[in-house]
Image: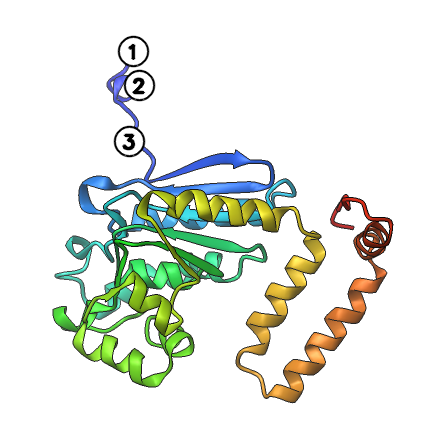
Amino acid sequence: MSADQGAARPEPTVLLERPHAGVALLRLNRPAVLNALNMVLREELAGHFLQLDRCPQTRVIVISGNARAFAAGADLGELAEASALAIYQRHVERHWQAISHCTKPVIAAVNGHALGGGCELAMHCDLIVAGESAQFAQPEIRVGVMPGAGGTQRLLRAVGKFQAMRMLLTGCRVSAREALAMGLVSEVVADAEALPRAIALARQIAGMPPLAVTQIKEVVQAGMDMPLEHALSLERKAFQLLFDSRDQKEGMRAFLEKRTPEYQGI
């Protein structure tokens, strides 16, 4: 056996699990550094998203960390001495786009730290379930930079100018309850319930008609930055389109017949 064959393979930085039919769970797996986002983790996470977006058996994706941290931001060891050109050549936007362009609903289950890139990762999701201990922040200003993966723009759209500027200009941490009041998260639950609740939501959404789920996500994302009249037109077209689906016929017939619908995504 060669030395290469005998060497232990590095442990994956992202673990894929299938807790229920239609649901994929991605666990960030760098516990020693609070799931700091290095390039290996970013690449693995993007690869999973590209695969799961194409997977017909996957209807909803859940992302979690561990009890101490969802993700504590970028791995500064890779960045401290980097030049502007080196940062440009990393093209990390491609990794983020694999998440933001995903057509399937994505739910973040957040415990502990969601800081910097970790907060940005949570904001890439469609729903955020936070444990009571969760803390959110964009502290990049404290190390001489600023958010670079949507932390200014997604935060602004989530909580408005005045709360966003407070977080961005001071790097302050926001508790789970404060984040809920600001509109930054969907729900706050006991710490032990964050992941189970996220999976329960994923199961519920996975049981909905897939075409309608996809259209809702597409219209919400596209319409956010459109003038209202254009966004309403987009909504009408998507609504009308769904009347050509078998799932629409099945859903309405099942309602009238007082039975559980069986959706097939067609």
Q: Which mark is residue 10?
A: 3
C-alpha distance separating marks 3 and 1: 18 Å
Vertical placement of 208 versus 147: above or below? above
Q: Secondary structure at mark 2?
A: helix
C-alpha distance separating marks 2 and 3: 13 Å
* Amino acid type assigned to the residue bearing label 2 in the image: Gln
- Apparent side of residue 19 relative to residue 38 in the rendered image (left or right): right
Residue at the extreme front of the image, as rendered: 258
Q: Secondary structure at mark 1?
A: loop
Q: Quadrant of residue 262?
A: top right
Quick one: label 2, few (<14), some, or many (20+) residues within 10 Å?
few
Residue at position x 57%, y 44% in the image: 203
Q: Earlier in the sequence, mark 3 or mark 1?
A: 1
Q: Secondary structure at mark 3?
A: loop
Q: Which mark is residue 1?
A: 1
C-alpha distance separating marks 2 and 1: 6 Å
- Apparent side of residue 192 relative to residue 34 in the rendered image (left or right): right
- Apparent side of residue 239 relative to residue 54 in the rendered image (left or right): right
Residue bearing mark 2 = 5
Residue 250 seen in render:
yes
- Apparent side of residue 247 relative to residue 8 in the rendered image (left or right): right
Image spot of residue 233 (x, y percent): 71, 82
Quick one: label 1, few (<14), some, or many (20+) residues within 10 Å?
few
